[in-house]
Image (cartoon, rainbow, N blue to C red):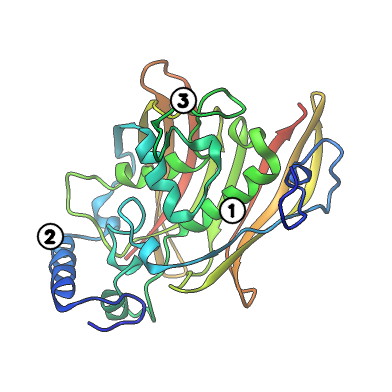
Amino acid sequence: MNNELKPQSAVQAAQTRAFVAGLQQGSQTYWDMVEIGDELSRDLHISPELVILYLDPVEDYNPWYEGWRMNSWHIDGESPFGGAIVPPLLVSHFVLSVQFDHTKPFAIGSIHTFHDSEILEPIPVGATVRITTRAIDKYEKRGRRYVRHEVHVTDTATGMLYFREVRDILSL
Amino acid sequence: MASQNGLNLDSLRITPETPVGYELQPIKKKAAIQLMGSRVWGRFNPNHWDPDYARSTGLTDPIQTGEMSSAYISEMCVNHFGAAMFKNARIVCKYIASTIANEVIVTGGIITEKTPKGNGFRFRADIWAANAAGEKKTVGWVEADVGV
C-alpha cells in the first residue's frame, strides 16, 4: 500500500489486513449486543505509564499528570492536590473497554456521540478504580440507533466516587 | 509565568473577577493518523487509522475518535480553570461531525454564565472544537467552581 496518510511496506500492509480481519471475526452490532439493564464492571489500575500512554497521542504535556518521566522513571509528581493526578477525562476514555463486553468480539462500526461527565474528585496517579456501566436506554432518532449508558467510577480501596457520566453510542 | 512569546500563562486562569464573555485561549492540534491509531486510542477500530478500511465503510479517510477532541477541550479547560477542573466540575460534549485525518483542530470557549456560590462563583462556558475552516466537530459546555 502506498498511501500518503499511512506509508507502509508490503509486509506492513499484509500485517494490517490480518489484524483488521481478526477484529471483524464474529462481531455483531452494538445494538444487538446490549440489553437495557445490562451492567458491567471492571477494575483499572491507573499506572503512571498508562497515563502517559493516554496523554502522548493527544499531545498534552501538563506536568501535573506525570508520575513517570524519562530518565527519572517513577516519581511522585506534583499537582495542586499533592502528587500527580489523572487527567479529567482519562477514565471516561476507558469506559469503552467496560461497556463493550471485552469477553465478546468487538462491535466495530459503533461511534461514541455524546458524554455528560461529572468530575467529582481528583484521582491520584497509581489509584485502582472500578468502572461500572449500566445500559439505561436504547432509542432511535432520525433513523439512527443509539445505546445510552450511565457510568460510575469509584476507588476500589476507599469507595470514593470520583466520576459519573452519561454517554451515548451510535450503533450500526 | 510569561512565555517567550510574551503570553502570560498565569493570566489565563479564571478568577472570581472573570466576566461573562471572556474567551478561552485555543488549543491547536493536528489529527495525525499515527496518533489516531495508537493502542489506547483508536487501534481497536480500523476506521480510526486504516485508510483502506475507512474507505470500504464509505469514509473519505480515517476519522479521529471523538474523545480525542474532548481531550483537547479538556486541556484548554485545565489551562483556564486549573485545579477547579478536578473537583465538582462537569463537561458535556456532543460529537456533531467527524474529524478527518490530517485536519487541524482548534478549540474554543466563552464564559456564558457565572452564578454566585459560596465565596465564589460557578462558571459555565460554551466549548467547541472546529477545523481550520471553522466547521465545528464537537460542541458542549463546561462548569466549574472558582473561589467557592
Amino acid type of the residue that numbered disc 2 sits on in the rendered structure = Gly
Chain identifier of the residue bearing label 3 in the image = A
- Circle 2 or circle 3, nearest the eye: 3
Q: Is residue A55 left or right of residue B39?
A: right
Which quarter of the image is occupied by the C terminus of chain B? top right
Q: Residues within 10 Å of mark 1 (few under 14, many from 20)?
A: many
Amino acid type of the residue that numbered disc 1 sits on in the rendered structure = Ile
The residues tagged by marks 2 and 1 sit, at their Cα atoms, a distance apart of 36 Å
Position of A146 relative to B49 (above/below): above
The residues tagged by marks 3 and 1 sit, at their Cα atoms, a distance apart of 26 Å
**Residue at the far top in the pictured view:** A158
Badge 3 element: loop
Residue B140 seen from this side: yes
Res. B73 mark:
1
Q: Earlier in the sequence, mark 2 or mark 3?
A: 2
Q: Which residue is at 58% across, 29% downward?
A: A79
| Residues at marks 3 and 1 touching, judged by CB atoms closer than 8 Å | no
Q: Which residue is at 66% across, 55% downward?
A: B127
Position of A51 relative to B53 (above/below): above
**Residue A133 picture location, percent across and down:** 36, 38
Chain identifier of the residue bearing label 1 in the image = B
Q: Nearer the viewer, residue B3 or A66?
A: B3
Amino acid type of the residue that numbered disc 3 sits on in the rendered structure = Asp
Q: Which residue is mark 2?
A: A26
